[in-house]
Image: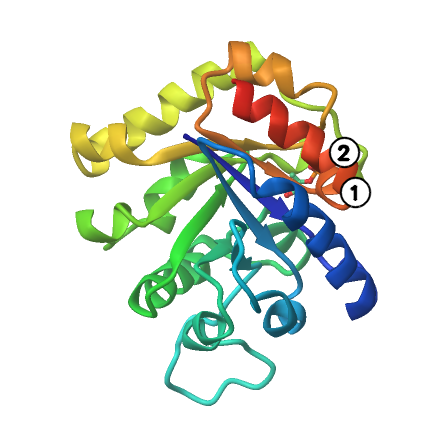
Amino acid sequence: MQLIIANWKNNPKTLARAKSLFLSIRQRAHKLKNIEVVVCPPSLYLPELSVGVSSLKLGGQDCSWKDSVPLTGEIAPSMLKSLGAEYVILGHSERRRYLQETDALINRKIKSALKGGLKVIFCVGDETRNQIRRGLDGIGGAGMVRLAIVYEPLSAISTQKGSPVAPSELRQKKALIQNALKQMFSRAVAQKVRILYGGSVNEKNIKSFLGAAGMDGFLVGQASLNSSRFLRLLRACERG
Ligand code: PEP
């Protein structure tokens, strides 16, 4: 089953537009089979989107590295959970680059999120092996079952004027990630953890990734902000 994560970043700019986008995806996505879709809106919008029955899951885009201490401006994993989020994205390349998030901080956030009962979408980029080694340090096999890894180099992100990684290169990246997981944990963990790709994936190029890259899903930014484009992408994933 493909795991598709919609990363809305700080979009849309109003709650009304966020609700309208979400509802229009939700109305048409409920018939999709064999595909897990997680929408990650700005966390402010979560309470308005988590009402009613939905085949779409929800996620946050970040969380604090501690749940139980006062931290100005931070959002604790338990708060995300109470607003209906099942997942949280951590280690996104934009936060690593522009907010100087380090591997050590991301490691603390992953632990905090898992402890708070969230599933983690852990993003790694060019320094894949080191980011995995440091980011997952001290996390047990039980935690790994609730974690997916996304390979998403900053240079591939559409809004950074990036271009997508070649599907043939992704196969090698997946093998490298699995190898790192095998060394750190076990063969079973390496096979179980879902490995996704993110970076300029859209409704037009999705087929090339599905066929050639062997990924377990995708993190989608820009193309998830238009319901028609996103639905076309989802239907292509459903067909495989
Ligand atoms: C992202 O920033 O997580 C992303 C994958 O964006 P895009 O699909 O727009 O490249």
The kind of residue tagged 2 is Arg
> Do the numbered discs 2 and 1 sit on residues whose CB atoms are within 8 Å?
yes
Is residue 140 visible to us here? no
Answer few, some or many: residues within 10 Å of disc 1's Cα (few below 14, many 20 plus, some between 14 and 19). few
Percent of width and height locating residue 155? 69, 32
Q: Which residue is mark 2?
A: 229
The mark total stands at 2
- Residue depicted at 29% across the width and 25% down the height: 179
Determine the CA span between mark 2 and mark 1: 5 Å
Would you say 231 lies left or right of 4 here? right
Quadrant of image for the N terminus: top left
Percent of width and height locating residue 187? 18, 28
Percent of width and height locating residue 97? 64, 50
Q: Quadrant of residue 61?
A: bottom right
Q: Quadrant of ligand 1?
A: top right
- Residue depicted at 25% across the width and 53% down the height: 143
Label 1 sits on a secondary structure element that is: loop
The kind of residue tagged 1 is Asn
Would you say 190 lies left or right of 93 here? left
Q: Is residue 126 above or below residue 47?
A: above
Q: Which residue is mark 1?
A: 226
